[in-house]
Amino acid sequence: MIAAAAAAWGTWSLFFRPAEARGGVDAPLEVFVVFGVILITTAPLAIRDRPGVRRPLAAWALLGLQGVFDAANALLFFWAMQRTTLAVAVLTHYLAPVLVSLGAPMIVGERVGRRAWAALGSALVGLVVLLEPWRSGGPVLGAGAWLGAGSAVFFACSLLAAKRLGRHFAPTEILAWHMPTALIAILPFVSRGSLSAPPGAWALIGLAGLGPGAIAGVLFIRGLARTPANRAATLLLLEPVVAVIVGVAVFDERLRPAAALGGALVLIAAAAVITER
């Protein structure tokens, strides 16, 4: 389920690029609409799945804080892509699996084995080879890289918070009820000009919120409940692999042999994680 969700997240460009081509669309609007669709579509599932027990106030507070983590992760990542190359933005953002593996023993009490560390190392090396940041034009370091690293921190915090919240909430509750605080955190960054985007752009972003947003979100949060956090984070490295494949297949982007080798390393790491007992 986590691998399927990561693959679905690799298809964001199928929705966002055509929407942006219609004009009037910016990153905060995309994030706000996607999160709003997720809340609307998953709230009925959360109401249905709620356990008939009281949850501590601290758990609800952490659920609200997770929404802020998610909002900060999404905004920082999109801003990183605007300030630096896509390769550098993605590579710094995907420092998150390392942070999750380091934090999992302390926050959720999960032991990280040698095989998991080896798979994570293989996946990160494969990601570097896949994206080839040394071939990209523009600034390689600077504010964009720091924004990408910041998104990695908040992404790791969000994933570990979701894992800890699984002790008190159903998976669909975690997905749905952290969205209100996320939407509140994003709202100040949505420009008034973007609200006049053409209907076709709104429709595409709404579809993104339903497919890679809500459906993939449900798959991920249900899979996370059954999977150690560090394995889940490593499997999420499938997202940039699928994104590159989409770029080649749909947008006529070129894939060099070295990049194909990097993608293979990520897939091998994912297979090692999935098949580990």
Image (cartoon, helix red, strand yellow):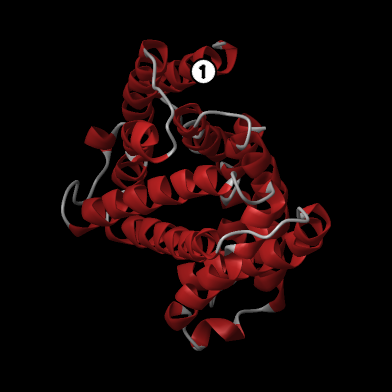
In which quadrant of the rendered image does the N terminus lie?
A: top right
Q: Which residue is mark 1?
A: 273
The structure residue drawn at horizontal position 70% and vertical position 52%, both measured from the top left corner, is 172
> Could you tell me if residue 26 is visible in this image?
no
Question: In the image, what residue type sits under mark 1?
Answer: Val
Furthest residue in direction bottom, as rendered? 192
**Other-residue count near label 1 (Cα within 10 Å), few / some / many at <14 / 14–19 / ≥20:** many
In which quadrant of the rendered image does the C terminus lie?
A: top right
Q: Nearer the viewer, residue 170 or 254?
A: 170
- Percent across and percent down for residue 275 are 58, 11
Residue 120 vs 247, above or below: the answer is: above
Q: Nearer the viewer, residue 122 or 65?
A: 65
Furthest residue in direction left, as rendered? 142
- Percent across and percent down for residue 81 are 36, 55
- Percent across and percent down for residue 11 are 60, 44
- Percent across and percent down for residue 77 are 38, 56
